[in-house]
C-alpha cells in the first residue's frame, strides 16, 4: 500500500495530547504534558538525559500506562478518528551474520509473508517502490546485519510510512550516523513533511539540526518547560537553564556556525570569497 503523495499537506488534521502523565510506582516521569501538533510539521522534542523524551514516545505508542488523552482530530469537521502511527526506533538488534535481507524484513513485517518461502515478485516490486522514496532501493537484497547506520534508518523509515500513518515518531533515529548520513536523513524528513499528509515528532539531542529543520520545538523536563518556534525556545530562559548557556549566546553561535558552513560550501562548489 503506497503512501498517498500530495502537493501540500491539508492542514486539517491535528494530534492533541492533553494532560499526559506517566508514573512507574511512585516515580513520576511525565506530568501534565500538553501538545497540539498539526500535519505537515516537524516537531522536535529536546531536553537533557532523563527528561522523559523516550517515555513520551512510549506513551504515545501505548507501551506504558498513561493518564490524560491523545486525540487525532479532523479540524475541518471536528471528528475524532483513530490515530495510525509510524515509528522509527533508535536501533534494532540484529545479530551479526543473520541471513535476513531487507526484503525479508519488510515482507514479513508489512505483508506477514514467511521468509522461508520463495520471493513474491509482486511484493518485491512494492517493497522496492517504498525504498526508492528513501534512496534505498539498491539495499533490497542486502543483509540487514551488514547495513550501515544510515542505510538501516532509511529502511526503517520506508517501513514506518508504508502503512500511511498520520503521525511519524522518530526516537533519536540518527544516533551513530555520520554527518553526511544525518544531512540525507533530515532532507528526507523535510520531503516527507512537505509531500505527505502526516505530522512528525522527533526526539533529538542534535540541537544544530533541530535549529535548522524543526518547525516547532518542545523543551521537556517531566513536563513541557516551553515550546514554540526555534528562536523562541532557543532564546528562552528555560533553554538556558537546561543547557547551561545564555540564550542569546546559543542563538548567535548557531547562526554564525550556519553562516560559516554555508560560506565554506559555496567556496567548495567553485565560488570566490571576493565575488
Image (cartoon, rainbow, N blue to C red):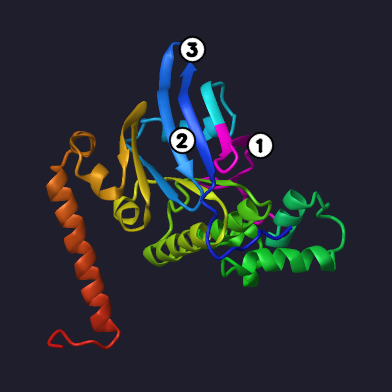
Determine which residue is flagged by label 1.
82
Image position of 256 with respect to 210: above or below: below
Determine which residue is flagged by label 2.
54
Residue 196 position, x and y percent, is: 57, 58
Identify the secondary structure beneath mark 3: loop
Q: Which mark is residue 25?
A: 3
Point 81% across, 54% down: residue = 115
Q: Earlier in the sequence, mark 3 or mark 2?
A: 3
On-image quarter of the C terminus = bottom left
Which label lies toward us, 3 or 1?
1
In the image, 139: left or right of 151?
Answer: right
Looking at the rendering, the stretch of residues picked out in magenta corresponds to 71-99
Identify the secondary structure beneath mark 2: helix
In the image, 28: left or right of 240?
Answer: right
Residue 171 position, x and y percent, is: 48, 44
Please indicate, yes or no, whether residue 45 appears anywhere in the rendered image: yes
Q: Earlier in the sequence, mark 1 or mark 2?
A: 2
Point 50% across, 34% down: residue = 16
The CA span between labels 1 and 2 is 22 Å
Which label lies toward us, 1 or 2?
1
Query: Image quarter for residue 76?
Result: top right
Point 37% across, 63% down: residue = 179
Task: Based on the picture, tell me whether residue 252 belongs to the magenta stretch.
Answer: no
Query: Image quarter for residue 239?
Result: top left
Marks 1 and 2 close (CB-CB < 8 Å):
no
Residue 26 position, x and y percent, is: 44, 11
Point 62% across, 39% down: residue = 83
Amino acid at each position: 500500500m503506497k503512501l498517498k503523495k500530495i502537493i501540500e499537506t491539508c492542514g486539517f488534521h491535528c494530534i492533541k495530547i492533553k494532560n499526559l502523565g506517566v508514573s512507574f510506582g511512585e516515580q513520576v516521569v511525565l506530568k501534565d504534558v500538553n501538545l497540539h501538533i498539526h500535519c505537515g510539521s516537524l516537531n522536535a522534542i529536546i531536553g537533557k538525559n532523563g527528561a522523559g523524551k523516550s517515555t513520551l514516545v512510549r506513551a504515545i505508542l501505548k507501551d506504558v500506562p498513561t493518564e490524560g488523552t491523545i486525540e487525532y482530530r479532523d479540524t475541518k469537521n471536528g471528528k475524532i478518528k483513530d490515530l495510525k502511527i509510524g515509528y522509527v526506533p533508535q536501533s534494532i538488534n540484529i545479530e551479526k551474520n543473520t541471513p535476513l535481507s531487507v526484503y525479508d524484513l519488510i515482507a514479513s513485517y508489512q505483508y506477514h509473508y514467511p521468509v522461508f518461502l520463495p520471493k513474491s515478485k509482486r511484493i518485491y516490486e512494492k517493497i522496492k517502490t517504498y525504498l526508492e522514496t528513501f534512496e534505498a532501493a539498491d539495499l533490497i537484497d542486502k543483509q540487514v546485519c551488514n547495513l550501515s547506520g544510515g542505510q538501516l534508518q532509511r529502511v526503517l523509515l520506508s517501513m514506518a510510512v508504508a502503512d500511511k500513518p498520520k503521525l511519524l515518531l522518530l526516537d533519536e533515529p540518527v544516533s551513530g550516523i555520520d554527518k553526511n548520513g544525518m544531512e540525507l536523513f533530515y532532507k528526507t524528513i523535510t520531503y516527507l513533511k512537505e509531500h505527505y499528509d502526516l505530522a512528525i515528532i522527533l526526539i533529538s539531542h542534535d540541537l544544530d539540526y533541530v535549529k535548522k529543520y524543526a518547525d516547532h520545538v518542545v523543551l521537556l523536563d517531566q513536563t513541557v518547560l516551553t515550546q514554540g518556534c526555534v528562536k523562541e525556545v532557543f532564546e528562552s530562559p528555560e533553554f538556558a537553564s537546561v543547557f547551561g548557556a545564555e540564550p542569546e549566546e546559543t542563538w548567535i553561535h548557531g547562526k554564525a556556525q550556519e553562516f560559516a558552513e554555508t560560506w565554506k560550501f559555496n567556496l567548495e562548489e567553485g565560488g570566490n570569497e571576493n565575488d
